[in-house]
Amino acid sequence: MWLGWPLARVLYLFLGVAFLAVFVQVTLFHMRQNFYHPTQWLPVIVTPALGLCALLLTWQDGALARAGLTVLAVSGVGIGLIGTYYHFAGTGQRVGGYNLNNFMVGPPPMLPLIVVALSGLSLVVLHGV
């Protein structure tokens, strides 16, 4: 089954599964905070769309799906950078400020960076940048 698959096809499959896994985690974390800030909805909406679009490209490489993944991946980079800012700022607002304990129990600053990295990889796979 895997023999003869081009690298791009394998990466689309990986990206699809990874985005859907991130979607589950982001949704659980933001649901725990009762979607306190409206921007918390952005990754909950965009990551499953990214995952489904990447999975679609695994089995059918079409111009519309490639364009959709491009737009979603660019927005994923932006959303991830915004999320990194909010997560880092939120950690500093906790009692004690920027200490190790607050990084362990507060908003995870690395999770939005994972969205940035996966979105960037999507753009590399799509456009060979």
Image (cartoon, rainbow, N blue to C red):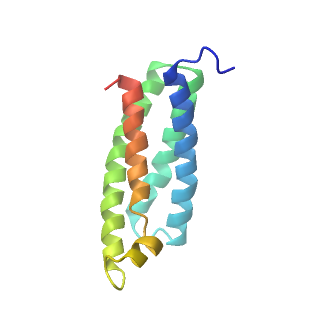
- Examine the rendering and report whether any part of residue 52 can be seen: no
Q: Examine the image and state in which quarter residue 118 appears.
A: top left
Q: State the residue in front, 111 or 38.
A: 111
Q: Vertically, is 24 above or below 51? A: below
Q: Examine the image and state in which quarter residue 89 appears.
A: bottom left
Position of 103 with respect to 62 (left or right) is left
Q: State the residue in front, 63 or 10.
A: 10
Residue 127: x %, y % from top left:
35, 24
Residue 106: x %, y % from top left:
43, 73
Judged from this view, the residue extending furthest toward the bottom is 95
Q: Residue at x 43, y 50 (%)?
A: 114
Q: Examine the image and state in which quarter residue 5 appears.
A: top right
Q: Quadrant of the C terminus?
A: top left
Position of 85 with respect to 51 (left or right) is left
In this rendering, the count of numbered labels is 0
Q: Quadrant of the N terminus?
A: top right
Judged from this view, the residue extending furthest toward the right is 1
- Examine the rendering and report whether any part of residue 107 can be seen: yes
Residue 2: x %, y % from top left:
65, 21
Q: State the residue in front, 100 or 80.
A: 100
Q: Residue at x 35, y 72 (%)?
A: 90
Position of 86 with respect to 40 (left or right) is left
Residue 96: x %, y % from top left:
34, 84
Q: Residue at x 55, y 57 (%)?
A: 25
Q: Residue at x 55, y 35 (%)?
A: 14
Judged from this view, the residue extending furthest toward the front is 100
